[in-house]
């Protein structure tokens, strides 16, 4: 995805050729690190630590005043970005909307919630608008009860739709396209809140609330009501999650990012071109067919993530003799974050440098509101080898943490010997995800 400038390294490394050792050695190295971590966990981690970790109250939030201020800020940003998309220059390089949506929000907020806890509910512009409307209509009650069987399925489908816009649509960085997407998503969200209640829709239907809430469980900072809690990192990932649609949600988180990398390989581009070029004269029709192929590929990647997890769990169940689908599911959340870092680290660093200029001229009209319109980014700040090392490190660390979370859950359910046996398949799954992720990122 190239938002404002041509960034050949935005999502990957473009095929690194100057590595000190062959790429396949990194694959073996990553797999060996996971195997050694598995052995160390089995030998040293004998009792559940994450589930029994203590939470210590850190501070109390002045809830109402801060909520109003942050909610107003979030809604103001949404209004500005929407107005720029609708009325600003229809160029991704001069309009703030593409960079804000795909870089500041989509890549920045996951980092914020992992570092500082789940601050998104306070910033959520759709929630802020719904809360404000609630004060104007006191006593309003939603006419329908949110069906428990829906769980997080609506959020998963909406997140898949956003991913399809970003990764499959032929012109995802068009401000006008994003304007339509923002308006549609806003209306869906507000209608869901009006029909089922704000809190109910946020828990199961609002894609970004569910997505960021899952990632925030990695954080060492918890937010419970008006209290800030300090806790061991990833301790909030301990335990089962029985909410329907959670596997679908996490599979979209992982599969869409994996497809993003795969779709930029020469192999996929050649296959897509071979379908489009020989038979289609209309460029518009070719774009639509290309979008359709990308959607099919992305759904296949999502299904591959879900299917491989279910196979691993089925093998684990043969040792544990009990259902385990919900028991190890949250161990995939650190991996999802690792994929985000590995695939988008360079985009965040490089394209993020454009933000000061765009803040001064959000509509692309030639303004200089804050004196930063002349700021020029340095796109040579990252070398391909540096990006590759960050990607490998993120993937390996994320999967080791995933192994630790799954192991902690296993020893809380089984005796140590049985717990280790249930993790054989999870180790294989982690190795598959790690090596597969490296392979995708290293392809030209």
Image (tube, rainbow, N blue to C red):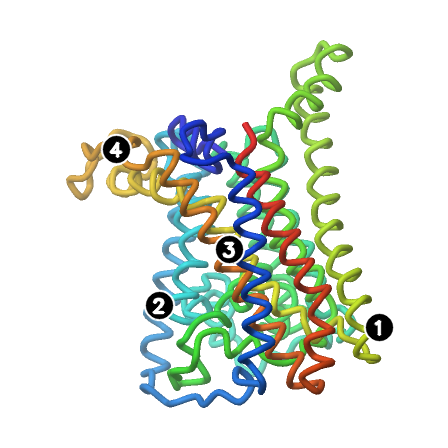
Dividing the image into 4 quarters, which one contains the C terminus?
top right
Q: Nearer the viewer, mark 1 or mark 2?
A: 1
Neighbour tally class for label 1: few under 14, some 14-19, many 20 plus, Cα within 10 Å: few
Q: Sequence order check: which comes first, mark 1 or mark 4?
A: 1
Report, in whole angstroms, how far the alpha carbon at label 1 lies from the one at label 4: 54 Å
**Residue to which mark 1 is pinned:** 318
Place of residue 28 in the rendered image (x, y in percent of width and height, measured from the top left): 57, 47
Taking depth in this image into account, of 264 and 249 the one nearest to the observer is: 264
- The Cα–Cα distance between marks 3 and 1, rounded to whole angstroms, is 27 Å
Front in this rendered view, residue 138 or 220? 220
Q: Which mark is residue 378?
A: 4
Give the Cα separation between the discs numbered 2 and 3: 36 Å
On the image, numbered disc 3 is attached to which residue?
Answer: 396
Of 82 and 164, nearer the camera is 164
Labelled pair 3, 1 in contact (Cβ < 8 Å): no
Pointers 1 and 4 in contact (C-beta within 8 Å): no
Answer few, some or many: residues within 10 Å of disc 4's Cα (few below 14, many 20 plus, some between 14 and 19). few
Q: CA distance from mark 4 to mark 3?
A: 29 Å
Q: Which of label 1 and label 4 is nearer to you?
A: 1
Residue 143 seen in the current view: no
What's the CA distance linking mark 4 and mark 2? 32 Å
Which mark is first along the chain, 3 or 2?
A: 2
Q: Residue at x 61, y 68 (%)?
A: 331
Element under disc 4: loop
Q: Secondary structure at mark 3?
A: helix
Say which mark, if any, is on residue 413: none
| Outermost residue toward the left in this view | 371
Query: Left or right: where does residue 93 sit relative to residue 48?
Result: left
Q: Nearer the viewer, mark 4 or mark 2?
A: 4
Q: Do labels 2 and 3 touch, CB within 8 Å?
A: no
Closer mark to the observer between disc 2 and disc 3: 3
């Amino acid at each position: 995805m190239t938002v404002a400038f041509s960034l050949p390294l935005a999502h990957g490394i473009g095929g690194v050729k100057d590595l000190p050792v062959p790429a396949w050695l990194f694959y073996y190295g990553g797999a060996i690190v996971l195997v050694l971590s598995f052995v160390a966990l089995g030998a040293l981690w004998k009792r559940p630590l994450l589930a029994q970790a203590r939470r210590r109250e850190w501070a109390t939030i002045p809830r109402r005043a801060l909520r109003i201020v942050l909610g107003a800020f979030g809604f103001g940003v949404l209004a500005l970005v929407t107005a720029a998309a609708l009325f600003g220059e229809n160029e991704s390089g001069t309009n703030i909307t593409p960079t804000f949506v795909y870089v500041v929000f989509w890549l920045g907020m996951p980092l914020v919630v992992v570092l500082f806890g789940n601050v998104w509910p306070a910033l959520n512009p759709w929630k802020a608008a719904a809360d404000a409307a609630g004060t104007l209509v006191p006593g309003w009650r939603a006419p329908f009860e949110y069906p428990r069987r829906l769980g997080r399925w609506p959020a998963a489908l909406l997140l898949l739709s956003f991913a399809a816009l970003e990764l499959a649509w032929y012109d995802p960085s068009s401000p006008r396209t994003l304007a339509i997407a923002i308006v549609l998503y806003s209306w869906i969200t507000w209608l869901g809140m009006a029909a089922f209640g704000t809190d109910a829709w946020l828990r199961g239907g609002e894609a970004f609330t569910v997505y960021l809430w899952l990632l925030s469980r990695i954080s060492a900072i918890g937010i419970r009501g008006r209290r800030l809690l300090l806790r061991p990192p990833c301790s909030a990932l301990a335990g089962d999650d029985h909410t329907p649609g959670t596997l679908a949600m996490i599979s979209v988180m992982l599969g869409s990012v994996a497809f993003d990398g795969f779709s930029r390989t020469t192999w996929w581009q050649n296959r897509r071109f071979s379908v489009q070029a020989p038979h289609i004269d209309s460029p518009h029709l070719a774009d639509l067919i290309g979008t359709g192929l990308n959607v099919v590929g992305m759904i296949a990647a999502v299904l591959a993530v879900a299917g491989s997890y279910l196979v691993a769990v089925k093998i684990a169940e043969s040792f544990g003799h009990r259902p385990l689908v919900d028991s190890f599911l949250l161990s995939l959340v650190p991996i999802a974050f690792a994929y985000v870092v590995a695939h988008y680290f360079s985009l965040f660093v490089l394209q993020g440098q454009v933000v000061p200029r765009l803040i001064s001229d959000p509509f692309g009209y030639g303004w200089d509101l804050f004196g930063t319109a002349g700021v020029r980014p340095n796109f040579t700040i990252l070398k391909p080898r540096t990006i590759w090392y960050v990607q490998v490190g993120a993937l390996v660390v994320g999967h080791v943490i995933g192994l630790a979370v799954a192991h902690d859950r296993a020893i809380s359910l089984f005796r140590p010997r049985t717990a280790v046996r249930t993790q054989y398949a999870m180790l294989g799954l982690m190795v598959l995800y790690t090596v597969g992720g490296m392979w995708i990122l290293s392809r030209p």
